[in-house]
Image (spheres, rainbow, N blue to C red):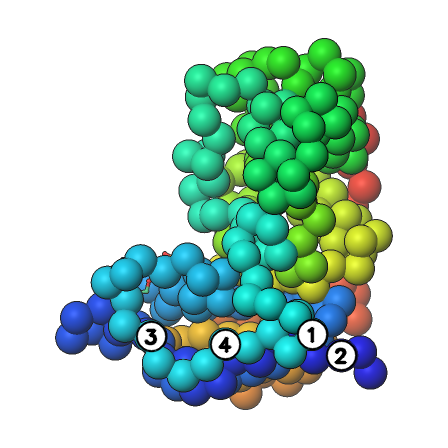
Amino acid sequence: MSEVFLVVQDLTVRYGVQQVLYPVSFELRQGERLALIGESGSGKTTLAMAIAGLLPASAKIAGSIRFPALAHEPRAGRDIGVVFQDSDGSLDPMMRVGDQIAEVIVTHLKTSWDKARQRAAELMQQVQIPDSQHRLREFPHEFSGGQKQRIVIAAALAAQPQLLIADEPTSALDTVVQNHVAKLLDGLVRAQRLTMLFVTHDIALASQLADRIAVLYRGQIVEIGTAEQVITAPQHDYTKALLATHVGLDWVKQPRLPEIDGVL
Ligand SMILES: Nc1ncnc2c1ncn2[C@@H]1O[C@H](COP(=O)(O)OP(=O)(O)OP(=O)(O)O)[C@@H](O)[C@H]1O
Ligand SMILES: [Mg+2]
């Protein structure tokens, strides 16, 4: 059994009088991939951003979030890579994409810009953007939606974080591109043995990308288990309802994410 990486204990969050998270507790082991699923407004982003330490000051937080394996408090961007929901907005339209990736490296790893740009080109290659030496000088509008999302992923991984938090990283993309980006993310996370918290409302995608699934319902984790357990023996009515909308989602027959050739 690998080491425990993250311990969330009795975490609550409220905004003013609105309670958004009720006591939430779970653990994540090093290298484990947990999908957080739940309907819109259930608190997925709130929980993910609480772990990243990125909730606004107006959020009233209680309980604890600990990283027993780390010697210091993790920083988002450095120890925790974050792909934000609606991450289109996380690329600066006026800045060359290579510089946006390189900036993460310069900021967090204190390297020179030259080295960071070289590394940015490698990262772009890793997220399957060909001709990256040349393309790193281009601006976001010169890339497709799927490519932009892969650049955002490259930037999230640029400082070699141990934990990746990806908040609906594919939901703005059409289905084919979504599969391609999901497959790529899956490959990167496995190759780098990253610990991942993956937020989605797509239970099929969750079962493909994660070892375990946590179901959030109205601010509470109503069930958590291996992807197989949650899909084959759902306990909560909400999970059952969610599965009913995925006719044919059969764990045994569950295909691996298809390999897709070509650049999307
Ligand atoms: N900054 C904020 N100020 C006040 N309320 C907030 C804030 N952020 C989130 N909320 C409220 O917290 C609740 C949970 O929101 P959250 O964004 O975590 O849900 P979600 O599960 O990520 O939903 P979605 O699937 O739509 O992204 C919602 O009722 C939302 O209105
Ligand atoms: Mg959200």
Distance of mark 1 from mark 4, alpha carbons?
12 Å
Within the image, what quadrant is residue 134 found in?
Answer: top right
Query: Along the polypeptide, which appears first: circle 2 or circle 3?
Result: 2
Give the quadrant of ligand 1.
Answer: bottom left
Measured Cα–Cα span from mark 3 to mark 1: 22 Å
Residue 3: numbered disc: 2
Look at 27% across and 72% down and name the residue there.
60
Q: Alpha-carbon distance for marks 2 and 3? A: 26 Å
Q: Residues within 10 Å of mark 4 (few under 14, many from 20)?
A: some
Residue 118 location, x and y as percent?
A: 76, 25
Tag shown at residue 135:
none
Q: Is residue 211 left or right of residue 200?
A: right
Q: Amino acid at mark 2?
A: Glu
The secondary element bearing badge 1 is classed as loop
Secondary structure state at the residue bearing disc 4: strand
Q: Which residue is mark 4?
A: 65
Name the residue located 50 percent from the left edge and 20 percent from the top edge: 95
Cα gap from disc 4 to disc 2, whole angstroms: 16 Å
Q: Which residue is mark 1?
A: 69
Query: Which comes sooner in the sequence, label 2 or label 1?
Result: 2
Judge left or right: residue 71 versus residue 87: right
